[in-house]
Amino acid sequence: MSEMTSDTVSTRHWHSLDDGRVQCDVCPRACRLREGQRGLCFVRACRDQQVVLTTYGRSSGFCVDPIEKKPLNHFLPGTPVLSFGTAGCNLACKFCQNWDISKSRQLDTLTDRAECTTIARAARELDCRSVAFTYNDPAVFMEYAIDVALACREHGIKSVAVTAGYFNAAPRQEFFRCMDAVNVDLKGFTDDFYRKVTGGKLQPVLDTLVYLKHDTNVWFEITTLLIPGMNDSTAEIDAMTRWGVQHLGVDVPWHFTAFHPDWQMRNRPPTPAATLSRAREIALGNGLRYVYTGNVHDSAGGSTYCHGCGKKLIGRNWYVLADWNLDRHGCCTFCGTQCAGLFEARAGEWCARRMPVDLATFV
């Protein structure tokens, strides 16, 4: 076996086939590769008759964001999160709005290198409460994400994953065991949409959501990008949110966000704000307690309300927290009802700032 480079590491979730190929088992795509070939994600490849990750320790850039941008509204609100991604993705969404990262086929765009301990130390020194694996799906760089998460845990820093949830069972378990919070992108609620628009399947994503709810203690929220004429019908939103109530419960926060023309869907119009408001009303009507609108300016749709008395608990103006009516236990200060999530004694004060970070200064 040839020696691996510093950014190419062996992986576990694969097996050999009788015809000499190897099959990657991280996600349902099950890429079958011959020597030298790469999977659809581009970053997992066959070398020396095994599947390797070729982007370990490399990033497209680091930035401190508000946690609400992930979006996570019930996980340490107002706090800064050190965010980064790598390259590649295991889906092929035609509407991808991070396509320059997730669809990258040029590994030389990954100019930033960072050891796991460096990331953890940088997060601590920057007063970040968490580190987020985002911009592209951490499923494709799970080994690096897991090692970073373990390093962060030693420094008291929590780990956040922003993912489409497109995992097989064994890697799903290994990955989420190391996460503290997750936002899962449920892209639609029909197999036809997933097949034609994302190149994937719906059921594995639903399986991930059910797993997170019933087999982990990970805090998770859901995002659905509504695309006019494709996944925004009243019937689909009704069916999707009814499924959520039945299988995930009423406390999972759900974000309906606006589509903007991008990547391979530049000819489709942006999502009207009224569509997001309609989706929010349908979801609330079906029993969900915390439903949000995103990518539009909507203070009401961005704020958190008590399901006990209806009073505003957390007011939001984009990513700026305008109100805070939770006590140190995360209960409504008006009626004492518990709000689902992970909250600190007071709101964070990071607001809407986005601060690029040079990890080289923390080495």
Image (cartoon, helix red, strand yellow):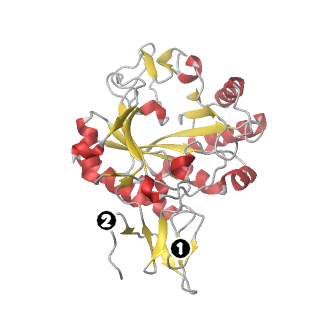
Relative to 243, is 133 on the left or the right? left
Q: Tell me the SS state at disc 1.
A: loop
Residue behind mark 1: 37
Residue behind mark 2: 6
Residue 326, quarter of picture: top left
- Residue nearer the viewer, 286 or 299: 299
x and y percentages locating residue 359 in the rendered image: 29, 44
Relative to 194, is 42 on the left or the right? left
x and y percentages locating residue 307 in the rendered image: 54, 22
Please report the residue visible at 74 percent of the width from the left and 38 percent of the height from the top. 268
Mark 2: which amino acid?
Ser
Relative to 255, is 4 on the left or the right? left
Please report the residue visible at 66 percent of the width from the left and 52 percent of the height from the top. 198
Q: Earlier in the sequence, mark 2 or mark 1?
A: 2
For residue 42, say whether it is visible.
yes
Tally of marks: 2
Between the C-alphas of marks 2 and 1, the distance is 19 Å
Quarter in which the N terminus is drawn = bottom left
x and y percentages locating residue 317 in the rendered image: 50, 18
Q: Residues within 10 Å of mark 2 (few under 14, many from 20)?
A: few
